[in-house]
Amino acid sequence: MKNYCSQIQLSQLPHSSTRKIALSNPIASAPPRLPSRVGRRQRVGQARPVLRQWGSKSSIFRCRGVWQLPRLFFLILLFSAYSCTNPPYKSRDVLGAEDFVMDSYRIREGKFSILQMEGKEYGELGSELLADYKDAIYNGDVLQIALFHPSRADLATAVQQISESVGFRVMDGRIELPDLGSVQIAGLTLEQAKEEIQKRYQAQIRDVEIFMAYKDRKERKIELAGLVQVPNIPVNGRLRLFEALAIAKVPPNANLFKSYVVRDDSLLPVDLYKLLKEGDMTQNIVMRGGDKVYIADPSASTLMVLGEVGKERVVDVPDGFMTLRKALAEAGGILSSGDRSFIQVIRGNILHPKIYTLHWEHVVRLSNDSMLLIPGDIVYVAARPISEWNRFVNELLPTFIAIDLVTKGIKSVGVNVP
C-alpha cells in the first residue's frame, strides 16, 4: 500500500512569508487571511493537490495508509485466530465408537493382548510351567545335617558343629562327612541324599538316624527387584509365583502391567494382574532357581488427558488399562467450553496413530468394559466453536484498547498550512 504521507515535502507548500507549520489540533486551527483575492486563488490552487493527499482534515491519522492500518491489522488477527484454534481432528482415517469398543474387548483379555495390539508378540503360557519338579541338589548348595546315635555323642557333636558353622557345601557333586569321607549326592533330592548317607553310616554304626535340610542355596534362588521387601527367596520345586510375591510383600499399588518374570534371559508370558487381582491360578507358575521377578512403580505406565478439561494431566495406569470415565474424572471432567461431541482418543505410533472420535453419549451409556484406555493413550476434548471465538476476543481485547489509545494520541498531532 502506497503511503502518501511520506511524499509530503515543504517545497510543495505555497510560497509565503506567513507560511507556518505547527503541531496543533487541525480542527481548532484557522487558516490565515490571504493579502488579495488573486493571490488567494493562486495559493489555493497550489495547495489543493496537497490537501487531497492529506484528506479533508490535516490529521496524520487521516492519511490513507494509516487510516487503513487498523482494519488490515484486525483482519490479520482474525485470520490468525482462526488458524490457531484447536478444532478436533477430522479425516477419513478417524475411527468411531464401534472400533473403540472392539479394541476395548481385546484390552480386557489381558496384558499380552494389549502388547499384541502394540505389535509385540509373545508365546502362550505352557502347561509345563505349572508342574512341580524334582528339587535336586546342585553344586554350590550348602546342607545342614544332624546325626543322632545313642552312644556316639562325639560323632553327633562333630557333625552338629560343622552344620552350625559353615555347613556341608556340595563341591564337584560331593560332600565330606566325619568318619565317612566323600559322598556323591549331586542330582539327588534331599530325601534320596538322606537315605544314601544313612545307609553309608549304618554300614559302620547301627541305629544311626540322619536329618537333612538346606542351609543355603546360592544358585537355587529367585531374585526380586523393584517394589519388594525380600530380594531373594530359595526354591524347592514346589514354590509358586503367588507364594513368592506374598513372601516378598508386594504393595497393593504396584504397577502389575509393567512387572514381569524372566527365566533364562527370556520374558515369561505371565500376567501378574490376572494372578493377583483376578485370582487366575493359570498364571501361578512354579518358580525355578535363577528366575528373576521385577515389580514396577505405579507411575511406570501413564496416559494423558488434554483439551477442555478441568485440569490437563498425566494419569497413572498401574493395571495396564483404565476406563474412559475414570480418566476424564481424574482430569476434573469436561468444561462447559468443551465440545462433548468430539472426545478423541489418540493411540499408538505418533507417526501413524489410531484416532477414535467418541460422543459423550457413548461415555455415559456404554459399559465401562467397552470404553477402555491403555498406557500411552492421549484423550483430547475439543473446544466448541463459540468457546474459541470468546477466547479469541478476550485475548485480543487489550490489543484493541491499545490501538484505540494510540490513535487518539495521534489525532492530537496535525499540520497547519496557512
Image: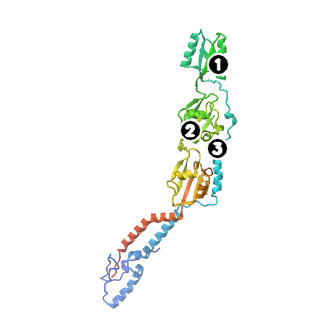
x, y percent for residue 159: 58, 15
Q: Earlier in the sequence, mark 2 or mark 3?
A: 3
Q: How many dots with numbers?
A: 3
In the picture as drawn, the residue positioned furthest to the right comes out as: 127
Circle 2: residue type: Ile
Gap in angstroms between the C-alphas marked 3 and 1:
44 Å
Q: Which residue shows up at 64% across the image and 18% down it?
A: 194
- The C terminus lies in quadrant: bottom left
Q: Which residue shows up at 47% across the image and 66% down it?
A: 393
State the residue in front, 254 or 42.
Answer: 254
**Res. 359 visible in picture:** no
Q: Which residue is mark 2?
A: 295
x, y percent for residue 368: 60, 51
Q: Which residue shows up at 50% across the image and 55% down it?
A: 310
Q: Is residue 265 left or right of residue 337?
A: right
Gap in angstroms between the C-alphas marked 2 and 1:
38 Å
Gap in angstroms between the C-alphas marked 2 and 3:
17 Å
Q: Secondary structure at mark 3?
A: helix
Categorize mark 1 by other alpha carbons within 10 Å: few (<14), some (14-19), many (20+): some
Q: Earlier in the sequence, mark 2 or mark 1?
A: 1
Q: Which mark is residue 80?
A: none
Q: Which residue is mark 3?
A: 112
Circle 1: residue type: Lys
Categorize mark 2 by other alpha carbons within 10 Å: few (<14), some (14-19), many (20+): many
Q: Which mark is residue 194?
A: 1
Q: Is residue 348 above or below residue 47?
A: above
Q: Is residue 56 above or below residue 135?
A: below
In the picture as drawn, the residue positioned furthest to the bottom comes out as: 37
